[in-house]
Image (cartoon, helix red, strand yellow):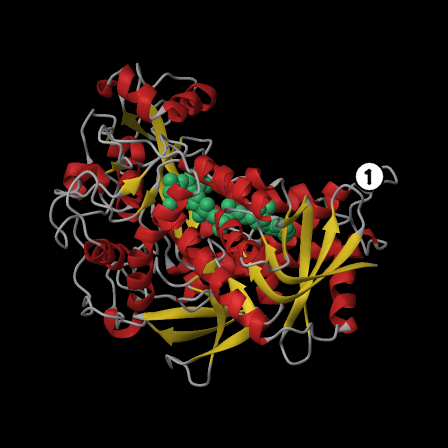
Amino acid sequence: MKTVQFDALIIGAGGAGMNAALQLADAQLQVAVVSKVFPTRSHTVAAQGGVNAALGNVMADKWHWHMFDTVKGSDYLGDQDAIEHMCREAIPTVYELEHNGVPFSRLDNGKIYQRPFGGQSQEFGGKQAARTCAAADRTGHAILHSLYQQNIRAKTHFFDEYFAVDLIRDEEGFILGVLALEIATGEPILIESKATLIATGGGGQVYRTTSNAHINTGDGMAMALRAGIPLQDMEFFQFHPTGIAGKGMLITEGVRGEGGYLINSEGERFMERYASMAKDLASRDVVSRAIVTEINEGRGCGPNKDHVLLKVDHLGEEVVAKRLPSIRESSRIFAGIDPVEEPIPVFPTAHYMMGGIPTDRFARVVMPLGEEQDEQNAVIPGLYAAGECACASVHGANRLGGNSLLDILVFGRLAGKDIIDYVKNNPEHRPLNQASVDRALYRLNRWELPPEGEALSVNELRCELQKLMEDHAGVFRSEEVMQKGVLKLQALRKKLAQVRLQHRGKVFNTARIEALELENLFDIGMAIAVAAANRKESRGAHARPDYPKRDDQNWMKHSLYFQQGDRLSYKAVRSTPLSVESFPPKERIY
Ligand SMILES: Cc1cc2nc3c(=O)[nH]c(=O)nc-3n(C[C@H](O)[C@H](O)[C@H](O)COP(=O)(O)OP(=O)(O)OC[C@H]3O[C@@H](n4cnc5c(N)ncnc54)[C@H](O)[C@@H]3O)c2cc1C
């Protein structure tokens, strides 16, 4: 088998992977970036609204206020040391992007344009802040393309359209690299590395209606699970309030930031009843629940009363053309309406995973050490995770809009910097472990073995999984619904063994990849379902009608899901920031 060696390996070419790669390549390290799609097609390219940093260009702002909003937004489940770190690092990170050529929208005075976004305030919960740095409604596109070009300049080595199958590790738990599949040829390749960063993004495809691209299948998280690493806080899945009804494509929160608002079938601006201060710019979990409640109580719009409307027409064509051009395009294509003339039909859509591979604030992957709920962690040497697949615990139970682009850029950059030191101190490759390579190869090839019994198709099973997750781990979750979901999921997962790919005697590489992705979706679906069924409180995105209140006494803790035996353990939330006073839990009102 073809084998190559690099100082550092980065799996994923979204904002997190590319910002890490840039640090490494600029430091003259040999760095490989593996991506299953061409790098600039990574989901970061779809980010619309912007990235948060307390630059104070439009009105007064401070990182400390940004920190408060993030802690409150997290429903007090975020680790306050990591949140402080991110909010402070936001400012140099955005300026570095600007210097790297990101074409941000500008104010008349030439400074970076910043728009109001949900859950943001001045003075620790006071007036609405404007903190989200934007390039029209194509911020992710602008960022990803600039980072790609900088990486080309810095001579990062890209493996474009290679699918990472599994991590290779030795008996001591060191990660030695990855087994990947070259999609064009179907050839496996072994990429050995001294340090590895998982930056594979989210897994919204586990739900039927999602804002996420087809490629967002949680591959890196599933790889971590199979390598014995737990996933943290997986029960917290964000439903974005404004997906195009029935389709799921995103209508950015920036629409409400620019003055758009939601109405029900009675034409009522209903958010005023749910969040008297922030109204339509309340936190996402709050707005999503409000929409579902309006519909459940019979005030939905349309012939089936199954969505609400997002009103934009009052903003005028000029604002829409300047600030929200892509939204107009998406509405025309996917909803068949022009938002300048008619309101957009919307419904919550599966959007973002707050949980993921547990890391510290330097993006190093950590394992719990010893006792349950102990704060102590052991670092897995040479293994890093950043971006949506990771859980540095800056979003806790609910992420604020504009904080994910921030998370991927900050922690991608910090991972790069930490890997430079790691490789300096660990200059040799460790010996390869053949048993681990064989396991990964088996996983790659097993779809073509002779079937035992009836052969099932990938597509059929994926649709069943997505429907199951939507029905049993959606916006509102009761005990009975979730317990049933776990049992059904366990049964459905057994059918994976029957999936076969033969199609008129041929197996396409793309079909092989879909099968591998399906297995990954099952792995993370199970993590979500098991963690959700066990958390007996309502916090952030995890809303239980049977336990409607947050329970700080018993549940101020992170969940850790281990694949073996579908086991859960818990660890304490780190409530002590680095340099400022802790924000104690309070009732979360917007
Ligand atoms: C429609 C939409 C709009 C959004 N808007 C905003 C916004 O305005 N502001 C904000 O803060 N956040 C926003 N978000 C969230 C944010 O964009 C994402 O969380 C973030 O971009 C994820 O970046 P990432 O680097 O972690 O991963 P991604 O950008 O998803 O990249 C993942 C990379 O991993 C690679 N990969 C995955 N699996 C494999 C594998 N098996 N083998 C090889 N390569 C693999 C992919 O090819 C890709 O290169 C939005 C999300 C969506 C879906």
Q: Classify residue 127 as left or right of residue 396.
A: left
Q: Classify residue 352 as left or right of residue 14.
A: left
Q: Quadrant of the N terminus?
A: bottom right
Residue annotated with mark 1? 503
Q: Is residue 42 visible?
A: no
Residue 448 in the image: x percent, y percent? 82, 51
Q: Count every numbered label the image shows and give the total.
A: 1
Q: Classify residue 308 as left or right of residue 520.
A: left
Front residue (pair 132, 250): 132
Residue 349 in the image: x percent, y percent? 41, 40
Q: Quadrant of residue 582?
A: bottom left
Q: Is residue 213 above or below residue 579?
A: above
Neighbor class of circle 1 (other Cα within 10 Å; few <14, some 14-19, many 20+) is few
Q: Is residue 112 above or below residue 442?
A: above
Q: Is residue 31 visible?
A: yes
Identify which residue is drawn at 24% across, 49% down.
Answer: 54
Residue 224 in the image: x percent, y percent? 58, 65
Residue 158 in the image: x percent, y percent? 65, 47
Q: What is the residue that sits farthest to the right in this orientation?
A: 505
**Three-letter code for the amino acid on which mark 1 is drawn:** His
Q: Classify residue 426 as left or right of residue 98.
A: right
Q: Is residue 90 above or below residue 382?
A: above
Identify which residue is drawn at 29% across, 37% down.
Answer: 112
Within 8 Å: ligand 1 and the Cβ of disc 1? no
Q: Secondary structure at mark 1?
A: loop
